[in-house]
Image: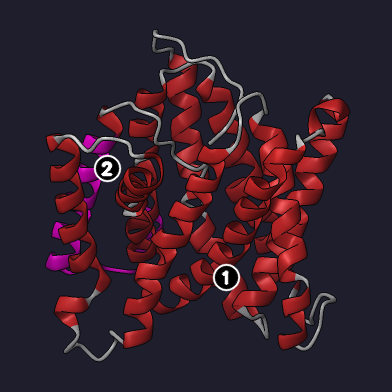
Amino acid sequence: MAATATNPARVTVSGVIAVLFAAASWATSGIFIKLILASGPVSSLYLAFWRDTAAFALFLLLSLAISPRRLKIRREDAIWLTGMGISLGVFHVALNFAYRLNGVSITTIQQAAMPAIVLVAARIIWKEPLSGIKIFSLAVISVGTILVSGLLQSDLPEVTIGSILVGFIVPTLYACWSLFGKALRSGYSALTTLTWAFGIAAMVLLPCQLFTGTILPVAVPFTAYLWFAGLICISTAAGFLAFIFALGRLPAGVATNLAMAEIVFAVAYAYTVFNESMSRIDIIGAILITSGVLLTAAQRDRIPRPLGS
């Protein structure tokens, strides 16, 4: 993620608390999305559009209040921001499908496979070296992803080709968001990058609303609007802003490692709210993915972690 932030060598208590708060906030997105989708005639495409639109409006207001001039983008970076926006919008559509098909806990774990895709892409695009530890972490994450995807449990009635496919698409789109952010020139604040990315994502999804039958808010129970407010304020804004705060108070590697707590929070939420359970194969896959991501983050090179889901 191209963001202007200090990278202190010292770990602070406030930074640790901020990252854990961000992880706990991001992990709530699956809960809010599942509750919204179950509340009425709300499609994954429709919800993704309104999530990105509301988040853009919120981040734009914050940017205008803090420093409007920081919203200026260099012309040569417009293509990378456009790529970030497109991948973010499509990612949110796929994420909504994944929560519906695979559940909160499994989908969150699948997202964690993103660094492996970034490592391979960075090797191809920027010729970044792959050390022995990186190759090992790639193998570990790949095995974990296969286990969690359901490929080895295809005989179970609840596992479908669609759910397996979405399980692989989600981390791929997540990686695209990271790679486009990686290509941005330095000098932009995280808030500026987020504002434009969410704005472009909303514009990309706007024409797609023709397939949903409406652009205006649909008739859903009042509680659905409460869940949507939670999705924007807690899962999106609070998580992003807390992580931005933490980046100025923690080394990047430490912040990335601590952010993996999102998996723990998501599994706990899913079990508590939806009574979701994980099979033995899922648990082994989750452990492998988490271990591989931690090995990747421990390298502390230029591979960033996108801010949340």
Asked whether residue 10 is drawn in magenta, I would say no
In the depicted view, which residue is nearer to us: 113 or 279? 113
Q: What element carries label 1?
A: helix
- Here the colouring is secondary structure
Task: Name the residue: 32% across, 26% down.
Answer: 300
Question: How far from the left and from the top, in percent, is residue 56?
Answer: 76, 50
Tell me which label, 1 or 2, sits earlier in the chain.
1
What SS does tag 2 mark? helix
Relative to 142, 219 lies left or right: right
Q: Give the range drawn in magenta.
A: 268-296
User: Most prominent secondary structure in the magenta stretch?
Assistant: helix
Task: Tell me the residue at 21%/36% (across/down).
Answer: 295
Say which of 39 and 171 sits in front.
Answer: 171
**Residue 16 shows up from this direction:** yes
Residue 47 lies left or right of residue 292; in this view the side is: right
Percent coordinates x, y for residue 176 in the rendering: 49, 54
Q: Is the residue under label 2 in contact with that under label 1 (CB below 8 Å)?
A: no
Q: Could you tell me residue 262's position as x and y percent?
A: 39, 45
Compare residues 266 and 4 and report the one nearer the observer: 4
> The residue under label 2 is which amino acid type?
Val
Please name the residue that numbered disc 2 is placed on.
293
